[in-house]
Image (cartoon, helix red, strand yellow):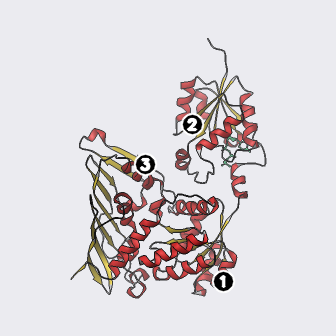
Amino acid sequence: MCSMTKVITYGTFDLFHQGHINLLKRAKALGDWLIVGVTTDNFDLERGKINTCNNVMERIDAVRATGLADQIIIEEYRGQKIDDIQRYGVDIFAIGSDWEGYFDYLKEFCKVVYLPRTEGISSTQLRDERPTVEIGLIGTGSIARRFVEEASFVASNSIAAAYNPDAAECKAFCKKHGIAQAADLDELYGKCNAVYIASPHYTHYGYAKSALEAGKHVLCETPLVLNEAEAKELFEIAKSKGLVLMMAHKTAYCPAFGHLITLLQSGAIGEIVDIKAATTTLTDENDAKMDSSRFGGSMNENGCFPLLPIFRLLGTDYSKCYFVSKYKDGVDIYTKGILFTKSASATFEVGLGAKTEGSLVVSGTKGYAYVPAPWWKTSYFELRYEDQNQNKKYFYPFAGEGLRYEIKEFVSAILANGYFYSKLPVKEILAMSRIQEDFINGKKVRILK
Ligand code: CTP
């Protein structure tokens, strides 16, 4: 029989610090063999920890470098602690006193020890001390309100000020959220190093251009602009000035959508032959989104949603896009589009004045992916096959309003100060603006009575 006492502890160990070292020393002193479980990036995301700065390999390296761990394992699912304790024959589970009581359920399997925590240091505190992106808001409508709430879940940013030409509306917004009000754009730019544009679509181009020219990073709501030449121009300015220009698109940055795409790109349903996507959001007739003089309408408002999986999975090299639209008071209350690439077809539906099943179906030669409505807020999807035993369901977090993921990407892109992989590539945004432009110009649009 082995008389060795095995101790296990777990943590994220982000921005590895003295508190972690002390904890590992204390845990090690409890026995002869120390096992350290380091959480995977996905598991942290699932637990709502979206701000981790180091990836799992960096965090493992930091733990290994202390020389205190006899064995390092990764923690990737809830409930794993019980499995590990049994699998490795663990005698003592040790964790910092910030978890006092929380892990008592493990007492059934081994001894549980809460160790004193080192005062005055934590990963959260170190993250908060990192440089901050000061964000200025342009537009103070409902999406800006959600942005402010969601930004509070993201590290390394603060909302510096807000601007809206309607000073009274701006004042009320600023008062409610405790944000400084900027009287004009110059004042706003003087207070921030990045802007979030949440104004009506037709003003995006002007604001984005002026912000980029003032040296500010830009996160702009969908649609970025409504024609390709303007989109190209903005990306060129951003590139020449070394600035981040991103289109805000909550679906593009959320965890489930990201994994759906990589699964399908790895051949999970064979070769893709067709995509069907619909995004309809019934809207009051008097809403600004229905105002023809302000480029309202279903395509302008919702077009970028179904076009996202289409361009991501089929590429942007499409032959033509045909539209069928139903209009009311000068705006399309419903539009259906169909386009082809060399190897696949796609149809999409958008509506502000008509409702339909808002699912996403990607058909392949070996099976299909089904994302139930509202697929653009994806938290769950299924891969389905001829043999139903092969079917698989996937679940993910979609925390809050989902904007925190794009805000995190924006802030990370700015702080990365160099290489950063954008989850929404420029060529896809250009293709989206080309489609919007063709639609606005009435190219291949059939209007229903
Ligand atoms: N820990 C500690 N003293 C600190 C910080 C952490 O003893 N000052 C312990 C925790 O109690 C846990 C282990 O270190 O047992 C790993 O904790 P982790 O959550 O990775 O570190 P935190 O600094 O607490 O991270 P965060 O601020 O993100 O919660």
Q: Residue at x 53, y 35 (%)?
A: 80
Q: Which residue is mark 3?
A: 395
Q: Position of residue 55 (x, y in %)?
A: 59, 47
Q: Secondary structure at mark 3?
A: strand
The amino acid type, in three-letter code, at marker 1 is Asp
Q: Position of residue 97 (x, y in %)?
A: 71, 40
> What's the residue type where badge 2 is placed?
Ile
Whether residue 218 appears in this view of the structure is no
Q: Earlier in the sequence, mark 1 or mark 2?
A: 2
Q: Nearer the viewer, residue 120 or 198?
A: 198
Residue at figure coordinates x 69%, y 52% from the top left: 124
Query: Mark 2 falls on what kind of element?
Result: strand
Q: Nearer the viewer, mark 1 or mark 2?
A: 1
The image quadrant that residue 390 belongs to is: top left
Quadrant location, the N terminus:
top right
Q: Residue at x 39, y 81 (%)?
A: 296
- Label placed on residue 74: 2
